[in-house]
Structures are given as structure tokens and as C-alpha cells.
Image: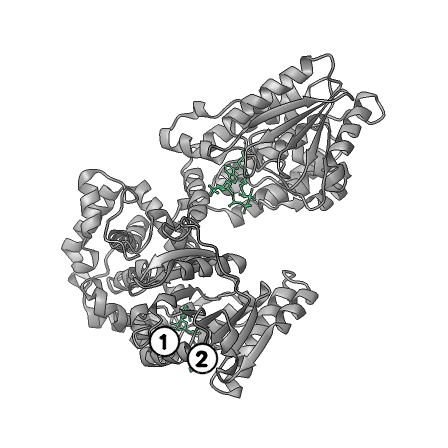
Amino acid sequence: MAKKIGVTMEVGNDGVAVITITNPPVNSLASPIIAGLKEKFQDANQRNDVKAIVLTGNNGRFSGGFDINVFQQVHKTGDLSLMPEVSVELVCNLMEDSRKPVVAAVEGLALGGGLELAMACHARVAAPKAQLGLPELTLGVIPGFGGTQRLPRLVGLAKATDMILLSKSILSEEGHKLGLVDALVPPGDLLSASRKWALDIADGRKPFLRSLHRTDKIGSLSEARAILKNSRQLAKKIAPNMPQHHACIEVIEEGIVHGGYSGVLKEAEVFKQLVLSDTAKGLVHVFFAQRATSKVPNVTDVGLKPRPIKKVAIIGGGLMGSGIATALLLSNIRVLLKEINTEYLMKGIKSVEANIKGLVSRGKLTQDKAGKALSLLKGVLDYTEFKDVDMVIEAVIENIQLKQSIFKELEKVCSPHCILASNTSTIDLDVIGEKTNSKDRIVGAHFFSPAHLMTLLEIVRSKNTSAQVILDLMAVGKAIKKVPVVVGNCIGFAVNRTFFPYAQAAHMLTNLGVDLFRIDSVITSFGLPLGPFQLGDLAGHGIGLAVGPIYAKVYGDRMFNSPLTELLLKSGRNGKINGRGFYIYEKGSKPKPDPQVLSIVEESRKLTNIMPGGKPRSVSDKEIVEMILFPVVNEACRVLDEGVVIRAADLDIASVLGMSFPSYRGGIVFWADMVGPKYIYERLKRLSETYGGFFKPSRYLEERAMKGMLLSESQSSRSRM
Ligand SMILES: C[C@H](O)CC(=O)SCCNC(=O)CCNC(=O)[C@H](O)C(C)(C)COP(=O)(O)OP(=O)(O)OC[C@H]1O[C@@H](n2cnc3c(N)ncnc32)[C@H](O)[C@@H]1OP(=O)(O)O
Ligand SMILES: NC(=O)c1ccc[n+]([C@@H]2O[C@H](COP(=O)([O-])OP(=O)(O)OC[C@H]3O[C@@H](n4cnc5c(N)ncnc54)[C@H](O)[C@@H]3O)[C@@H](O)[C@H]2O)c1
């Protein structure tokens, strides 16, 4: 059934016209809504029986802002004329400059263009807990309906720049204290209070305030310049590779120096330039890609309902088990934590406590909530209490026989409906469940470390996992504030498999004579938070060495055998875990490159002997990025080809949330499509002619390059799900 969308106007006997936006689920400002608003405001302004106007949104939500689908259409077509004229025509002329007072009745949320419409009204009445903010910068643009000008005039410049640059929303309670909200009333009184406020303005009992004309909260020019100087420093720190933060500050400054209307005009001009930027393309893609992950064919579209998961048992209280337990407890799920002996159990419980205390000390959790979460944790040493758990998550060491025996045991001790999940990072789920008759309820719940902070949850589905079990785990994932991405079963699953060439390529480059610290610095300038060597230190080189053979067994034709990890471990450098890897780690200070590691690198270079003519290879920064990330793209192509992910966008989200690939580049596949499959293919082909199979272009990449297709277009039918 098509959803009912539109703008309605009802004029009451009191002479108040109530204009209501209806566009479920968030009342986004799609083109027909904007056209409807223009028509109704024109009508209300002209009608003699209308004294005042109230603007509101249907179904408890004011508006989630401009329709982001339009950005996507503009990106696809390059046609800017798809963007309706709103800022001057509707917001300034028809609303703010209307001779009849307009009051916004805000409930639920007023975000982006939604808040901008509310700020153009002459007063705002809100229900409690309404979310107010201008998150446009997260989409690569700036507020475009006058928000850069009106928010500073309503809440002050320092607070406004903070809210806009950090895309931080506030609740209506705070908005009330700041002056953004004029009155806070219970939801049931919202419309009557707003009508009354509008009539009070019309009859001169309350002031007729036009936000854009206000100057009382801006301060002097020198004060404003000092705030904007700080904002520029903040922008440099938080968004070094993005244009919208600096552009937004310029636009705000224009309004401060030359007046609000001049600021509105500049805002519209800059907004249009930014809509077409690569950053906006990447971020808008990520917005929709993240939401698409909750649509899983044959799971979320077949009428199944998730079963309630109230009690979960975790086996293994090490690094991952304690992190997963923390995440569950914080969402009010009871946890049984099982370990092998009292010493390890106490260690596991202490880790959970430390995770929770860490959140309290960083102000992310109240003491009360911390106490409540910890009261839901129980440590055990056997399976006696497993009979009534809804789900088990196994997180013991990476050992096939151990995991197989645990799952065999679980089948006996748990109820037949209990979900049996494993947090394995490399072992085939079919192998883990081999000795059981419960293959339909065995599933991978691959969390990323630290599990209570990283948002990605790879849900690994074997050929036998039932749709109900996938749906249940997706629901748990969402309940504990993760982004679940359903992937197929293969060594490394989607993220680790796609990125296994990342460290390998870095090792190859180093063995070719390129300075390893330069490689890390080039990759961080590209936008990843850690370069491959620092990431290796963080994960631990012991793990690197242990998983190497597992990957070699299946992907051996495209591995670069570097002796560097082994040499590093031999010299007692395990990584961050023991304070020494490629970098030195000291408490309270940033990791420092360790020059002593260079002699180990020399030893490795002698063993591999791949430097052309024995001399270090000279490479540009661009070549470093390409030699490290193009092999990753190549593996992403194989992941797409084998149907390990449902859609290419899932791999984008997985790379952004699991590997911190820069979201403003849209994820690994989106970025590759922007660079161009043909270019990547040709570069890899040339590299493989010089350096061999590691760079050999995959069949999928070659096919798409030859046909001029994007990598994200039509996937293979060889689905693993
Ligand atoms: C000119 C202006 O200055 C420019 C702008 O206004 S740009 C837009 C600014 N607004 C935003 O960035 C808000 C974006 N939306 C959100 O943050 C969240 O969706 C929300 C907080 C509003 C609601 O969250 P939640 O209840 O969890 O629902 P969520 O799953 O995110 O969204 C529900 C649906 O609404 C869609 N939606 C949300 N906001 C939308 C928007 N502004 N435009 C189009 N669709 C939107 C989502 O895509 C999703 O669609 P789907 O069901 O088909 O996947
Ligand atoms: N470390 C990571 O970054 C990471 C990321 C994702 C997934 N994983 C996977 O998570 C799993 C656990 O990894 P980890 O890093 O937490 O390991 P870890 O060594 O820190 O913890 C494993 C814990 O399991 C306990 N254990 C072993 N046998 C047990 C049994 N029979 N019953 C109860 N407890 C038992 C051990 O005492 C130990 O405390 C592995 O499968 C690993 O591949 C690890």
C-alpha cells in the first residue's frame, strides 16, 4: 500500500491555521512536502480568517529534515535542479517574514531542515525529550535552510558551532534552557499551548521575534572571531580531510560580519557546491547503506518475529568474552559468564567491571546504571545453569577441537530452542558444528575488539543456519546498539578476509625498501585511524603469526610471505600488549616510532631480497596508497563474487565499522568505484607483472573493468547464504 504523504491545513474557530506535515516514518521534507508547505503558507497568509499559524508534524515527530533520497538522486544524475528552492522562498519569505505569527509545535524530533523550519517560526513550543539538532555535516553538506544563521542567534555562537560541527543534538529540556525552545509542555497540551502562543503573539501579548534579525546572543565581533578561531582548530582536528566543516565556519562568519540575510545567501551557494562533493556522495551512501543492512532477504521479509532474548551465557571471559558480556549487560540482558577455573573467572569479571567503570569515569554511564548492569552478571564454572539461557556465545581460544567439543556439550545442556553462537574469527562454522545435530541453530556472532565499543557485529550464516536464528541475533545486535551485518561463511568472513592483504602489502612495501613509518603516516593521511604497522602492534604480532597459516591454506596463491613478524617476535616485540612492537608504548604517552626496529627490517629485507637491484624502491605517496589498498579492493571483489555479502553496500558498512575505513570515502567498494575499476585493474595488472601473484587482478575485477561496470553493480549468483 502506498504511504499517505502530504501537507494539510486546518483552520480553527480561534483563527489559528494548523499546518501538518505527513511523510512517515520521520516526516522528511521531500519535494511534494516542500511544495505543500509553500502552498499552505501562501494560503494561510492570504486568508482573512487566519490570524496565526502553527506548524507541526504528524505521528509524534516534527521532521527528520530534508529528504536525503534527493541528495542521492542528485549524486546519480549530477542534476542540481532537483534541489527545491526553500531557504529564501519558503523559510525567509513565506514563514519568517509572514505578517501572521507562526509557532512550531515540536514533538519527537526536529533535525536538519526540520529544526531549520522550526527556527524560522516566531516561537517554538516543544514536548519533553524531543531531539533537536543540525546533523547535516555527517552527510557532507551544511545546514541549507538557514540553520547556520539562526542557530547561533538563538543559542549563542559557541553552543551553535559546537552543535553543528560535532553534529550533536540536544533534548528539548536543554533547548528550553538555551532559549531555542520557548515553552516545554506535556505532549497532550502541545497543540493547544502552541495555538495559544501564536494568538498571544498576534494580539501583542508576546513578542513577535524573527530569529534572523536577532543579535542579542552573538556578542561582539572580536568575541565572535575568537570563537570561530577555536572552531577552525576543532574542524582541523576532527575533519582534516573533509570540506564541509571549514565551509560551514566561513558561512557562519559571513552572517556575523555582514548580517543574517547575507549569511543565508552564502549558505545556499556553498550548500549547492557541497552537495556534489565526493565527501557528500560517500557519506550519503553510508547513511543508506547502514539502514539497508537490516533488510536481509528470506529473513526479514518472510513474516518472522524475533524471539525475546533475556539471558545469555558466554563461554570464555578473556578479551572478547568480557567485552561481549559488557555490551549485553549495558542493555539489560542477564549474563552467565563461564570460565575454566576461579582465577580466570575472577579475571573475566574484573575485566567487565573495568569496562563499565571506564564508561562511568568518561561520563558515558551513570553510577546507578553501572550498578544495575553489574547486578545482571553471574560467574559460573560449569554448565548447570545453562538450561534456561536463550543464547550462548562461545568466546574461548581459537582451537577447533576445543570449540567442537564445547558445541557438542552445549547441545546436551541447553534447551532445544537455544541459539548457539561462536565468536570465532577464522574457523569454519560448519566445522565447529560438525559433531552436533544442531547445525540450524549454530551461527557466527563475530564481534570486533573492544567488543563493548566497536559497533560492527558480523552475523555469520552457514548454509544450515535457520532464518529465525539470524533474525534473533540481528535483534540482539540492535538491542545492544551494534550494527549487525549478515555475511556468509568463509575464512575471515567479510571484514578480516577483505583486509587480510592490508598488512601483507605493507610488509611487501617495507621489504621493497619503503620506510614503514612513512607507510603508516601515508595511510593515516588517507583517513584510516591507524596505519598497517600500528594496527599490527595493537592486534598483537602473536595473533598475526598464528592466523597466517590459516589464511595461507585457503588464499595461499595471493600471500606475501614476510619474515618480519617472526623476526619481531623473536626480538621480544609482541606489540602494544608488551609495550614494544614497531612502536614503543608507554603509559600516558602516544606511541613512538622505535628506530631500533629498523635493524630488524634490514634483516627481513636481506631474507626476502626483493629490492630491485638491491636498492630501495622509490615510491610516491599515491603509489603507497594504491599498493596497500588496491589488493584489499581485489579481495573485496572476490568476496562479492562469492556472495559472502548480500550487497556491496554491506561490505562498505562492514569496512567502515569494522576497519574504520573513512566513512567520507563511502566504504571500500564505494571508494573503489569512485577511483574506477578499470584504473585499479590496470594498476594491479602492472604490479603483478613486476611483483607476482599477490597483485594479480581477480576475475570479478577484470570482468567489470573490461565491461566498464562498477564493482557494486550486480553481484554473482554464487551466494554463500
Ligand atoms: C537543507 C537541510 O539543511 C538538509 C537536511 O535537512 S539533511 C537531513 C538532516 N537530517 C538527518 O540527517 C536525519 C537523518 N535521520 C536520522 O538520523 C534518523 O533516521 C532519525 C533519528 C530521524 C530516526 O531514526 P530511527 O527511528 O532509528 O529510524 P531510521 O531507521 O534511521 O530511519 C527510518 C527510515 O527513515 C528514513 N529516513 C530517516 N531520515 C530521513 C531523511 N531525512 N530523509 C529521507 N529518509 C530518511 C531512513 O532511511 C529509514 O528508511 P528505511 O526504513 O527505508 O530504511
Ligand atoms: N582478540 C580479538 O581481537 C578477536 C576479535 C574477534 C574474535 N576473536 C575470537 O574470539 C575468541 C576469543 O578470543 P580472545 O581474544 O578473547 O581470547 P582470550 O585468550 O583472551 O580468551 C579466551 C578465554 O577462554 C577461556 N576458556 C578456554 N576454554 C574454556 C572453556 N572450556 N570454558 C570456559 N572458558 C574457557 C580461557 O580461560 C580464556 O580466558 C577466539 O575465537 C578469537 O578468534 C578475537
Residue at left offset 49%, top offset 84%? 382
Which quadrant would the C terminus be assigned to in this image? bottom left
Q: Is residue 686 positioned above or below 589 on the image?
A: above
Residue at left offset 71%, top offset 25%? 213
Which of the 4 image quadrants contains residue 163? Answer: top right
Amino acid type at mark 1: Glu
Q: x, y (%) of residue 241? A: 45, 45
Q: Nearer the viewer, residue 430 or 275?
A: 430
Q: Is residue 483 positioned above or below 6 on the image?
A: below
Distance from Cα at disc 1 to Cα at disc 2: 22 Å
Q: Indicate left or right for 25 with 15 as reference.
A: left
Which of the 4 image quadrants contains residue 565? Answer: bottom left
Write down the residue under mark 1. Answer: 398
Write down the residue under mark 2. Answer: 413
Amino acid type at mark 2: Val
Mark 1 Cβ and ligand 2 under 8 Å apart: yes
Q: Is residue 282 visible?
A: yes
Q: x, y (%) of residue 307? A: 50, 60
Q: Nearer the viewer, residue 184 or 213?
A: 184
Secondary element at tag 2? helix
Q: How many neighbours does mark 2 have within 10 angstroms: few (below 14), some (14-19), or many (20 or more)?
A: some
Q: Indicate left or right for 366 with 68 as reference.
A: right
Q: Nearer the viewer, residue 634 or 380?
A: 380
